[in-house]
Image (tube, rainbow, N blue to C red):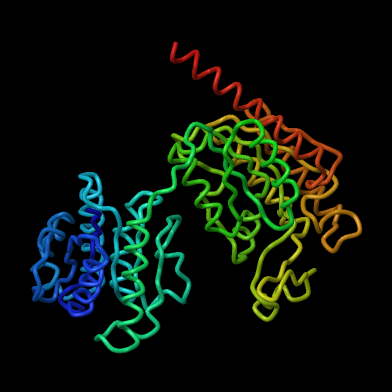
Amino acid sequence: MSNVVMLGTFDTKGTEFAFVRDRLLNGGVDVTMVDVGVLAAPDMSVDVSRNAVAEAAGCSVDELANAGDRGAAMIAMAKGARRVIADLFKKGRIDGGISLGGTGGTSIAAEAFRSLPFGVPKLIVSTAASADTSAYVGETDLVLFPSVADIAGINRITARILSNAAAALAGMVLAKPVVASVDRPLIAASMFGVTTPCVTHGRQLLEKAGYEVVTFHMTGTGGRAMEALADGGLLSGLYDITTTELADELVGGVFSAGPGRLTGSTLSVVPRVVSLGGLDMVNFGPMHTVPEPFRKRKLHVHNSSITLMRTDPLECRELGKRLAQRVSRLGGPCTVLMPLLGISEIAVGGHVFHDPEADEALFEAVRNHLDHDRVKLVEMETNINDPRFADRAFAELQLLLDCTNKEQVQWQE
């Protein structure tokens, strides 16, 4: 029978956890109870005690309770819970995970569940689910389920919410898994609305050539997830057309992927083709959220939720420098393609972000700071969405992949 792990502070929310446990059992799955509370012993039987969780973190529950530091206690229990969950999964005792909580309980459970691989169902019913959840979810497929009301007692509202959450997890765990093809090499592609034609055409070429392609939306989390897959050895190559997240990182937009974008770990040797898609723009929220210093800049309302700001020559010069320096330090082979007639759909001639001076500052910085002995540079008199550009990007990636595969065969021989 399938088994899910229920992780929680049973000392403060025992009634609610017991309710969800019973719903899961009625739904046809077994439940392993892991207690991460530190205030008092739970009034229910558990499979992994709070003492065992604390010991996994190198401390004791009594030490945490006596210290009187709630934040430090939560950090320690999260550390221990992560190790416990990882060990249970390694032993084949976890098919899914569920928890309930406010910000504290959510942070502990999220830290623990992020140790579970992609595809293993993991769900937290949380009061924080309607806010910015990036700190909890990270680059995983963790699901935060809005609790609507506080998780404090079983009533007509919480009973329905918790029942739905239990049913959702049971359904995910018991559903027949989709058997995906694993014999095709996996390629990641980076896309934004303003580079969609290029990435779509490239994806079609790659799929026709026998690759499986997963496309990421470059909204910060997309870039981090893509880089994490590359570092984890799950990708054969990257069709990295859209590097717009670098602009948000530099200027302070809402879609920054952080300093890990285009860096890779020291173990990542994944071939990639990189372009400058979307470096003409910084993303902010609705117009009224644009910071005051930028109100007089060239702005474009993309939709009711997103306002774009055109990067100026000074910013483009720095972006070109950062991109060139980062790709020059990548562990794997890389080719940079520059579309000289437009780096996004709205940066071509006649469109709102057309700015030849800013573009040239970007191009010149890439030329000046790229390690040309390690990274090939291809310049094309096309815009980024011209089919000829996608054709060349595909051809360059195929060349890198072919060379990498030959080297691997020679090494194995």
Q: Is residue 190 left or right of residue 184?
A: right
Placement of 105 over or under 322, stated as above or below:
below
Placement of 211 over or under 323, stated as above or below:
above
Q: Is residue 392 left or right of residue 246?
A: right
Q: Position of residue 363 (x, y in %)?
A: 77, 44
Q: How many marks?
A: 0
Placement of 89 over or under 102, stated as above or below:
above
- Residue lying furthest bottom: 156
- Residue lying furthest top: 413
| Residue beneath the point at 78% across and 39% down | 389
Is residue 42 or residue 157 the one in the foreground?
157
Q: Position of residue 155 (x, y in %)?
A: 28, 89
Q: Quadrant of residue 232?
A: top left
Placement of 338 over or under 343, stated as above or below:
above
| Residue beneath the point at 90% across and 55% down | 349
- Residue lying furthest right: 350
Q: Position of residue 44 (x, y in %)?
A: 10, 72
| Residue beneath the point at 12% across and 60% down | 47
Q: Position of residue 386 (x, y in %)?
A: 82, 44
Q: Quadrant of residue 209?
A: top right
| Residue beneath the point at 71% across and 57% down | 315
Is residue 259 or residue 13 the one in the foreground?
13
Quadrant (top left, top right, bottom left, bottom right) of the C terminus? top left
Q: Quadrant of residue 77?
A: bottom left
Q: Is residue 187 left or right of residue 117?
A: right
